[in-house]
Amino acid sequence: MRRWPLAAPYLAGSALLVLVPLGLAAALAFTDYFGFRAPEFTGADNLTRLAADGTFWDAVGISAFVAAVVVPLRLLLAVGAALLLARRRGARTAVGRAAAYLPSVIPDAAWALLWLWILNPLYGPLPALLGVLGVPDPGFLTTPWGARLGLVLVMTFQVGEAFVVALAARLAIPARLHEAIEVEGGSPWFAMTRVTLPLMAPIVLVLAVRDMVVVVQNAFVPTLLVTDGGPANATLTAPLLIYRRAFEYGELGYASTLSVTLLVLTGIAAALPLWLAARLAAHQRART
Amino acid sequence: MIVLSAVFLAPLAVMVLGSLQRPLQPPPNGLDLWPDPVEWTNFATVPRFMPLGRLLLNSLLLVVVAVPVTVVVTSMAGLAIVTARGVLRRWLLGVSVLMLLVPAAALWVPRVVLLRGAGLADTPFTVALLALAGTTPFYVLLFALAYSRIPSALLEAATLEGLSPFAVWRRIALPLVRPAAVAVAALSGLYYWSTFMDPLTLVSSPGNWPVALGLRNLSEMEAALYPIYLAAAVLVTAPALLAFGIAQRSFFSSVERS
Amino acid sequence: MSVVVEGARKEFRARRGARVMALDGVDLEAKPGELLVIVGPSGSGKSTLLRVIAGLEPLDAGRVLIDDRDVTGVPAGRRDVALVFQEAALFPHLGVAANIGIGERARGTRRRDVESRVREVARVLDIEPLLTRMPTELSGGERQRVALARAMIRSPRVCLLDEPLASVDTELRLRMRGEIRAVQRSLGVPMVHVTHDQVEAMAMGDRVAVMAQGRVLQCDIPAEVYARPATTAVARTFGPLPMNLLPAVDGVVTGVRPERVRVNRSGAGRAGTVAAVEPAGEECLVRVDDVLARVPMADAPHPGEQVVVTWRPEDEHHFDAETGARR
Amino acid sequence: MSVVVEGARKEFRARRGARVMALDGVDLEAKPGELLVIVGPSGSGKSTLLRVIAGLEPLDAGRVLIDDRDVTGVPAGRRDVALVFQEAALFPHLGVAANIGIGERARGTRRRDVESRVREVARVLDIEPLLTRMPTELSGGERQRVALARAMIRSPRVCLLDEPLASVDTELRLRMRGEIRAVQRSLGVPMVHVTHDQVEAMAMGDRVAVMAQGRVLQCDIPAEVYARPATTAVARTFGPLPMNLLPAVDGVVTGVRPERVRVNRSGAGRAGTVAAVEPAGEECLVRVDDVLARVPMADAPHPGEQVVVTWRPEDEHHFDAETGARR
Amino acid sequence: DEGSPTAPITVQVGADPEEAAVYRSLVSAYEEAGGGEVELVPVSRDDHLTRLSTAFASGDAPDVFLINYREYAPFVQRGAVRPIGPLLADAGVDTADYYEEPLRAFTYDGALQCMPQNISSLVVYWNRALFTQAGVPAPKADWSWADFVATAGALTRDGVKGVGIDPSIVRMAPLVWSNGGTIVDDDAAPTRTTLHEPGARAALQSVVDLIGSGATPDKEQLAAQGLPEQFMTGKVAMFLSSRVEVPALREQRGLDFDVAGLPVMGEPVSVLHSDAYCVASGSENAAAAAKFVAYAVGQQGQTLTALGGRTVPSLRSVATSPAFLSPARAPASSQVFLDAIPHLRHTPVTPSWPEVEDVIGTQLERAFEDGVPLDEVLAEIRKQADPLLQSR
Ligand SMILES: Nc1ncnc2c1ncn2[C@@H]1O[C@H](COP(=O)(O)OP(=O)(O)OP(=O)(O)O)[C@@H](O)[C@H]1O
Ligand SMILES: Nc1ncnc2c1ncn2[C@@H]1O[C@H](COP(=O)(O)OP(=O)(O)OP(=O)(O)O)[C@@H](O)[C@H]1O
Ligand SMILES: [Mg+2]
Ligand SMILES: [Mg+2]
C-alpha cells in the first residue's frame, strides 16, 4: 500500500521545473530586476507600486470578465459535446468527436491569425455571415466590447482537451448505473442531472479550475496576436500586461510581483468553485 | 450535432481554403473563400522561409521523448496520490493544485536560469524536461480521478497477490485507466507539438527548435504572403491531425470495450 | 398484472468470437401476484432472463409481454419494472437514503413524501441506521439490502430480484423472505426471483423454474418439482441437496434423494465405506462412496466405517440414461 | 503456519462523524491446517476482520500474528496472504487465465508453468471453458469461482475466504467445499472462511467463530456451538434455522431449536394458530404464532389451523434475560 | 591574422521572414569571406525582446543583437551592452565615414554604445497611378501641410482614401517638431511630456482635422487591413512610414509607387528610424563580435542589406551608391531619404521610453479613431506618461 515512491519522479521534476523556479519568482517579486545585473532587493516597494497600479487592476478586471464568460462557455461546449458523443458508435459520432477536437490541433499562433482574418471587419467571413443573416456586426476588432467578444470566440472553441477529458469521464461511468436509472423509469434529463453529471463533477471541476487558470494567466497569445490589447486597452488582459511588463519594458522584478499577485488571485478565485462544489456534493449526497 | 461539428470544423476549413489562395493578391472578400485558381505551390514555397524538415524532425523527437515520459510520470504520481492517505494525500494534492495555478510567464525566466545553471539548456530535448514535472499537474489530477474510479478491491487484490507498487502500477492500474492514458498522451503530444514559448525561452540554437516556433516566426509574414503562412500552418497541423486520428481510434475503442 | 416470456433467445458474442447461448428458447409466465422462483447452476442464464424482462438486453428472438402487452421493443424506462441487480449497483455519489429514493424522485414524487417512504422501507429491511452512510461505507449484506429497498419502495408492474439475499445471514433472511412476500402480495404484482438457496426457493416460490444452459427444464410448484423432477439435471439442481444418481443400468438411471437414504451398520443394501461425515445441526451429511445421505446426528457413522445404504423402492426416481428425462 | 488476532479493535468514521465499531476487541486463532469458519449477521465485522488479517485495514488497537511473527505493521503485499473478496475483484482488463495467473507471474514463475497450473486449478473449479473469456462476460457465480481459483493457485501462508460461494448453486457448492478443504489440507495452511450458509459452516469448519457487532461471541467446534450456544445471539445466528427464543420468565429466556419443536393437533403444550407453512423438501417450516418449527412434510398443518407445540425439556436452552448469556 | 579562425558567435535579430532572408545572406557572405562562424538567431519581432530578456537573465545572451534606438536605452542603462566604440576602432572602423545622427542616437552616457546599420526616416509613400487618376500633381519637395491636406482631399474618392497615418508618437513627432512644438521638456533628460503645449497641440489638431475631413481610412478600414496592405491594394493613395516598407511594396506586382518628403508645418524636419548592432556586455568573443559588426556595417554588408531594399545605409559611401539610389528599383526617389538627413531628429533615449510610446499611442488612437476630444487625450497622456518619465 505504500506507493508514494511512485510520485518521486513527479515531485523531483516539479521541484526542479516548477517549485524552485516559483520560489525564485516569488523572491524576485521583492526586487528590481532587469535581467542584466543581479536583482536589487527593494523591500515592499513593488507592493506599494502594485497597489497604485491602475492599469494592472483594470487588466485583472478584464481577465476576470473574460474568464467569467469563457470558462462556462468552454465547459458547456466540452461537456455538452462529450455527453452528445458518448456511447454511440458510428461514422457520425466519429466525425463529431474529431470535429470537437480539431480546433485544438491547430497551433496557437496559426489559430490566432486565422481568427484575425475570420473576424476582419471588412473581409472576414464571420461579419459577412452575420451580414447575410441580418445580425448586426458587433465590430469584432474595432469596438471595445466587440473586441472582447471576439476574444471570447477565439478562446472558446479550442476545447479539444476538455472535451477529451470529459468524454473519458463520461465513458468511465459504469453502464450498470444507467441501467438502474433506466429501470427506475428516470428520464434522460434526470439520469443526466442526478447521475451522469454528479459522477462527472470532480473532473468537470478540475477542468473548470484549469480553464480558469489558462484563461486568466496563460492565454495571452490570442490577446497578443488578435487584438494586441486594443482597441484602447479594451482587451489588455493581465497576462498580456505582465508579458509586456516583463519583456517589452524589461521589468522582470515588478513583473514577478504581478505574476505572484495573479497566482494568489486565481488561487482565491479557484477556491470558490472548489468550495461551492464540495457544498453541492455534500448536499446532493444527503438529500433523498 | 451536425451544426456543432460544422461550427467546430469551420476554422479548419477556412485555414485549408486560405492556404490554397494565390499569394500577393488582395485578400478574399467575406464568404468568397473558394480559391480560384488553387495554388498548390504555396506548400512548395514554405521551405524557402523555414527549414521545415529540420524543424519537423526536432518536433518529432521532442514528442517521441516527452509524451511517454509524461504519461509514465503523471500516471505513477496519480496512483501515488490515490493510494496515499491522510496528510500525505492532502499534501500531494495541494502541491499539484498550487502548481496548476502558477502562471507560465512567472516561470520562464527562473526556469531558464536554473536549466542553464544545470547545463541542460539547448538540446532538442530541453523542452522535454518539462515532462519530468508531468508537463502540467492537470494530467496528474486527471490520472488521480481516473484511478479513484477503480474499485479499491482491485488494487488491494493486486497488492495481496504480491505485486510490487511498480507492478501494480504497470500491470493493473495503468491498463485499467487506459482511456485516461491515451487522453494524456494525446493532450501532451499536442502540447509539445504546438508550444513555442517554451523553446523560445529555453532553447538557444535555432537548429534545435521545434516546428511550432518556426511557424511562429513566420507569423509576421507580409499580409500579402498570408496564404503561404497558412500553407505552413496546414503542414504543421497535418501530423498532429494524423496522430489524433490514430490515437482517437485506440482511445475510443479501448473505452468502449470495457 | 402478469409477465410472459415467449421463445426468448439471446446469444452473447464473447471476445475471441466464442458464442454463448445465454437464453435458448425460454417460455415462462408469472401470473398476477405470483412469485416465480428461478434456480439453476451458475451461468445458466438466470440474470440474462431478468435483464431481458427488464428491457436491458435486446432479444435475438422471441418476445416479452407485460399485462398481455408486447413490450419487446419498449425501452426499459417505460416498462415499469423493478429490478434488484445481482451486484447491487448503488450510486457511489449518493447516500443510502438518496439511493433508495432515487427511483421515486425520478418519477417526480415530492421530496418530503419520498423521505417518509424511504424511512419506512428502511425500517422494514433493518437498515434505518445506515440511511446517512455512503455506499462505500457498507458491508456486503448491507449493500444488498439497500438495493432491495430501492426496488421495494415502488409499486411496479413486475418485480425482478437477482439473488438479493445472497450475503444476508439466516435469521435476517428468514425475516426478509416474509417481508418480500408480504410486499408482493399487497401489490399483487408478479415477481421473478433468482436464488441459489434451495430452501428459499421451496419456501417462497409459488412456482419454480429450473434452468440450465439457457433453457427452462421444468416449471411447476416446488413440491411437484421436488417430488417428480423432470430430468436428471433438475434432480441434481433442485432440492436442499442434489439427488444421488446411480450409474445407469440397462439405460436407466436411478436417483434417490439423500434425505431418503438410510445408513445402517449392517443388513441388506449397497455396502460401502464412509468417505466423509459433515455435521449439519440435527443431521449430518454422510458420503458413502458415491452416495450422499442425510442422517440424524445420533446415527452418524465414522469416516472409514463399513456401512450399508438402503432406501425404499418408492423413493426411487428413474431417468433415461441417454436423454436424462424422467421415466 | 498459523494466524492469531489479539485484541483487534477497528473503528470506522462514517460521513457526518458517525462512528462504527467494526471490530471491538477480537481475539481469534487459526492453527496450522485448521479451517476456521466465521459466521455472523450482516455488518458484524467479518469482512473487516479478514481485511485486517490481510493488512488492508490498519488496526486501531491489537495485533495480528502470522506464524508467531507480529505482522501488525507489515504492509499487505509482504504478508503472503491469499484473500478472496466478497465482490470477486477480478481485473477487468485481463482475461480469466491472466486473472488467475497474475500472482504467480508476479512472483516470477515462468509463463509455461503458470499456464499449466492455471489449467489445473480451472479444471478443479469447473471453469476451464471460461479461461479465454473476459471478466465482464461471466455470470455472477463464474466470477466467484475465478476469484477462488486465483487464491487457490498459490501457496500462501494464510488463506482468507469472504463468502466465495455465495452465488454458486448447491451441487457445485457441495463439490467446491470438498475441493477447498482438500487444497487447504494439502497446503497445511490456516484458513479463515466467512459464510452465511450455516450448513456450510457446520460442514466445513474445524471450528466456528460467531460474531456480532464487532465481537466474537463464541468460538468452538461447530457441534459444541450448535449444542450449547453461549448467548441468545449465537443461538439465533448459528444453525440451519435460528433458535426460537420465548419471552422471558423470571429473568430467564428459554430457547428451543425449530428442529426440536413438535407440532401436534392436540394434547398438552403451547396452543397457537399456524401463521405460515413453508415447504422445504422433506420437511416444512411451520410458524405457530412466534414459534418456528421444522416438521416432516407429512405432518404439515394448514395455515390457520389451531395446533399445539411441544418439545422435550432436555431440548430447552436457558439464557439470562438481561445479558443473554447461557445459564 | 588571416586564416586563424575566430570563435563562433551568435547574432540575434528580430525580423519578419523576408528580412530574415536578408540577414541570412549577410551571414553567409561574411562566412564565405572568411569572417568566422556565425550562428544567426532570427526570431519574430514580437519575440525579440522576450528572448533577449530571458537569454540575458540566464547568462546566455547572444554576442550580437540588433535593436532599435527607441528600445535600446533600457539595455544600456541596465548594463547589458558593451560600448562598441573602442571595439570598432580595433576592428578598423572609422565612424567618420558614417552619418552622424544615428551615431548620436546610439550614444549614451557619452559613449557610442551600438553601431547603427541604417538611417531611415519618415517619408510619404504615394501611388502614382492614383495620383494620375485623380489628376493630382506629384508631391513637391518641401510641400506644406496645406498642400498635403489638399492633395489628400483630392485623392479621396469612392473606395480610395487620400492618406493613412498611424496614431503613434513616431509618426506625430516630426509634425510636432515642424510646428515648433516638443514632445518632452528635455530631450536629453526628459521629466515630462509637452504635447499639450501650444505648438505640439496645434500640430496634433491639424492631424485631427485632416482625419475629420474624411480623407483618411476609418476605424473599420484600419482594423481590417494594415496601412501598407491598403496602400498596396490601392485603397489609400499615400501613407507615412519609414524605409521598412520597400521590400514588400516592391513585391507587389503592378504597383507604381514613390516616396516624398514629409509636408512642412513650420520648418522641415523628420524623425530618425535606425537599428544598430550591439555587443552584449557578457560576450566572451567581443573581438569576433566586433569583427562581424564591422563587416555588417561595412561596405559589403551595407551593400547587401541596401540591395534588399530594407535599409537606408548609414555608411555614406553606400548610401550614395547605386545599391541604394538606383532609380531602376522602386522607389525612384530614394534620394528623399538622404535629403531628410540634415533635418533628422530623434525621440528621447530613456529607459521608460517604450512604455511612454505605448501610452501615447493608445491615447492618440482614441483621439484619431474614436473622436475623443484632443484635450482630454492630452491630459490623460500627461497623467500616465509623466510619472513614467520621472520614475527613472
Ligand atoms: N456480456 C456477456 N458476454 C458474453 N457472455 C456472457 C455475457 N454475459 C453473460 N454471459 C454468459 O452467458 C451465460 C449466462 O449468464 P447469466 O449471467 O445469465 O448466468 P446466471 O444464470 O445469472 O449465473 P449466476 O448464477 O452465476 O449469476 C453465462 O455462461 C455467461 O458466461
Ligand atoms: N469504510 C467504512 N466506513 C464506515 N463504516 C464501514 C466501512 N466499512 C464497513 N463499515 C461498517 O462496519 C461494519 C462491519 O462491516 P463488515 O464489512 O466487516 O461487515 P460483514 O460482517 O462483512 O457484513 P456482511 O456479511 O454484510 O458482508 C458494518 O456495520 C459496516 O457498515
Ligand atoms: Mg446471475
Ligand atoms: Mg462482508
Image (cartoon, coloured by chain):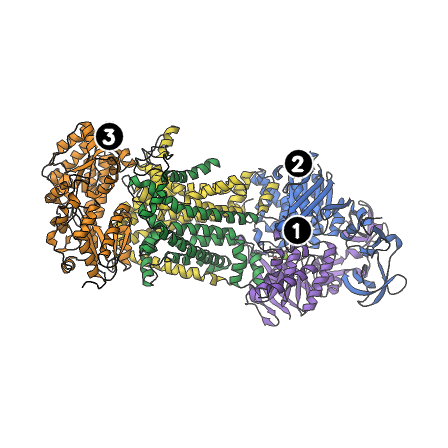
Chain colours: A yellow, B green, C blue, D purple, E orange
* Residue type pointed to by label 1: Ser
Task: Determine the CA span between mark 2 and mark 1.
Answer: 25 Å
Q: Residue at x 79, y 67 (%)?
A: C303
Dot 3 surroundings within 10 Å: few (below 14), some, or many (20 or more)? some
Q: Is residue A101 left or right of residue E287?
A: right
* Chain containing the residue with disc 1: D
- Respond whether the residues carrying marks 3 and 1 are from the same subunit: no
* Residue type pointed to by label 3: Val
Q: Which mark is residue D139?
A: 1
Q: Residue at x 79, y 53 (%)?
A: D294
From the viewer's side, name the closer residue of D309 and C273: C273
Q: Is residue A200 left or right of residue D295?
A: left
Q: Quadrant of ligand 4?
A: bottom right
Helix, strand or loop at disc 3?
A: loop
Task: Determine the CA span between mark 3 and mark 2.
Answer: 74 Å
Residue D233, position as x, y percentages in the image = 69, 58
Labels 3, 1: front one: 3
> Disc 3 designates what residue?
E160
Q: Are marks 3 and 1 in contact (CB under 8 Å)?
A: no
Quadrant of the image containing the N terminus of chain E: bottom left
* Residue type pointed to by label 2: Val
Q: Is residue A52 visible?
A: no
Q: Which mark is residue C71?
A: 2
* Chain containing the residue with disc 3: E
Helix, strand or loop at disc 1?
A: loop
Labels 3, 2: front one: 3
* Chain containing the residue with disc 2: C
